Amino acid sequence: MGIVEWRKQLQRGEVSARELTDQYLERIAAVDPTVHAFLEITGDRARADADRIDAARAAGSALPALAGIPLAIKDNLCTRGIRTTCSSRMLESFVPPYESTVTERLWNAGAVLLGKTNLDEFAMGSSTETSAFGPSRNPWDPERVPGGSSGGSAAAVAAGECMGSLGSDTGGSIRQPASFCGVVGLKPTYGRVSRWGLVAFASSLDQVGPFTNSVADAAELLQVIAGEDPRDSTCLKAPVPDYVAALEAPVKGLRVGMIRECFEAEGLDPQVKASVQAAARHLERLGCELVDISCPRFNDGIATYYVIAPSEASANLARYDGVKYGYRAAAAAADADSLAMMTARSRAEGFGDEVQRRILIGTYALSAGYVDAYYRKAQQVRSLIRQDFDRAFTQVDLLLTPTSPTTAFRFGAHAEDPLAMYLADLLTIPANMAGLPAISLPCGFDDQDLPIGLQLIGGVLEEPRLLQLAHHYEQAAAVMTHRPTAALVA
Ligand code: GLN
C-alpha cells in the first residue's frame, strides 16, 4: 500500500493509524533480528504518535499530509530525546536536545516514528559494514550487504518494516543502497532540503532524501521535507513546487542523455549494463528521445570526492574532542598528562578505522604545502565536472546511468581493499559534486535475483521532471510486480 491509498483508507475509517503502526511493529519484531535495519525501535513513541492521529480523526480534525505514515529515520538525523549515534561509539550515548528540521516537518505532517536506522559510521562507507553496532543485511539475500551508508533505511523499506524512510546522500548513500535493496531513493538538489540537525559529514555535498516503495511516495515525502529553512544558510529559498501533481505530466518528447562514460566504465557488471540499456529502450517506447552524451570528467568524480569529502569531514569531526560531545576515553583522566592526550585517546577509541582513515586523508589534503596539490586541485576538477553537466543539459532534459556498477556484494568482499569499496560510488558521486538531484529506482534483477537500479540525474531544482519520468517508467515497466520471491521482502 502506498501513501495515497493509505490516506484514503484512513480518511474513510477503514483502518486506524494504530492498527497500521502495530502491523509495522510486528513486522519489525519478526524480521529485524535478521535484517538489523534498526539501531533503536521506538515502539512506545510510535503507538503514541498513531493514537494522536486516530484521536484527531475521531474529533473530526483535518488530517495532515502524512497522517499515520510509519517511517524510519537514519541515525545521523537528530531526534529530540532519542539517541542519535551515527553508528559510532563516539556518539553511543548522545541524546540530542533538538530535532532536525526534516524530522520536525515529518512529525508536524503527522508521520509516525518507528525507529532509527543503521548506517556506516558517520555515513562513511557503502555497505553498513563500518557501523560500530554491526551491519544490516540485504533483505533479498541476507548474505549480502544492503549498500550504504544509509543501508538500514533502504533495507527497512525493502523488508516491509516501514512505509518510507529518510537517509542522507553525500556521495551516493541514498541511491546506492536503494539500488542494492530494490527500492526508490531520491537525492534532492543541494540546498533543496535543510541540513539542520543532520550530523555533518561533508557539508558541501550532504543532502537528505527519502526511500520509498514507489516514486509517488518519494514525491509525497519530498513535498513535506523540502523548502527554505532559516537555520540552514545553504538551504535554497526557491518555492517548493507540487511534486505530486508533476508526476502525471506527459513524458513524450523528453530528451534523455545516456552518459557514454558510464556505460564504458571499468568494473560495470554486464548484467547491470544490459538491464539499464533495456530500461532506456523502454523510455524510448514511452516517447522519450535517447541522446548519446559525453561527460569526459564523469569518472574523475571518485578521485575528486575522496579528497573533498575527507577534507570537509576532517574539519567537521574536529568537534568530537572528548570534552563537549560524546565518548571520552575511560583511562584518560588517570594517566593522560595533557588535554591533547585525552582528546587523542578519546578519538582513537571512539572512532572506527574508516572514520580515522578519512580524517587522516582530509587533514593531509588540507595541510600547508599539500593544499594546492590536493584540495585546490580537487575543487578545480569539481568545477569541470559541473561544466560537463551544464553542457549536457543544453542538449537533454535528464541523464540516465546505472546507479551502481554492480548489484549487492557479499559481506567482507572489499574488506581488504578500501579503494575497491570506494568504486561502488563511481556513478553516484558526480551528481553530488555538481549539487544535482538524482533518483535511483529498480529496473530489473540479475541472475542471482538481486535488484538492479537505474539512476536519473536532473538539472538544478528539476525534481519535478525527475520524478515525472521515474514515475512513468515505474508504472510502464512494472519491474516490482514481476519480482523474484525473497523471504525477507514484503
Ligand atoms: N560511500 C561514500 C562514502 O563512503 C558515500 C557516503 C555517503 O554518501 N554518505 O563516503
Image: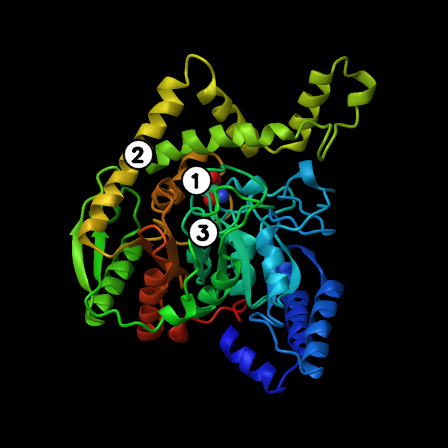
Residue 123 visible to the viewer: yes
What is the number of callouts on the image?
3
Distance from disc 3 to disc 1, alpha carbons, whole Å, reads 29 Å
The answer to whether 342 is drawn above or below residue 142 in the figure is above
Which callout, 3 or 1, points to the residue nearer the camera? 3
Question: Residue at 36% of width from left, 53% of height from top?
Answer: 403
- Determine which of the numbered discs, if any, sits on residue 192 in the image: 3
Which callout, 3 or 2, points to the residue nearer the camera? 3
Q: Quadrant of residue 272?
A: bottom left
Q: Earlier in the sequence, mark 3 or mark 2?
A: 3
Q: Position of residue 167 (x, y in %)?
A: 53, 53
The residue singled out by tag 1 in the image is 421
Q: Residues within 10 Å of mark 1 (few under 14, many from 20)?
A: some
Render colour scheme: rainbow
Q: Residues within 10 Å of mark 2 (few under 14, many from 20)?
A: some
The answer to whether 435 is drawn above or below residue 65 in the figure is above
Distance from disc 1 to disc 2, alpha carbons, whole Å, reads 25 Å
Question: Residue at 48% of width from left, 42% of height from top?
Answer: 234
The residue singled out by tag 2 in the image is 383
- Determine which of the numbered discs, if any, sits on residue 5 in the image: none
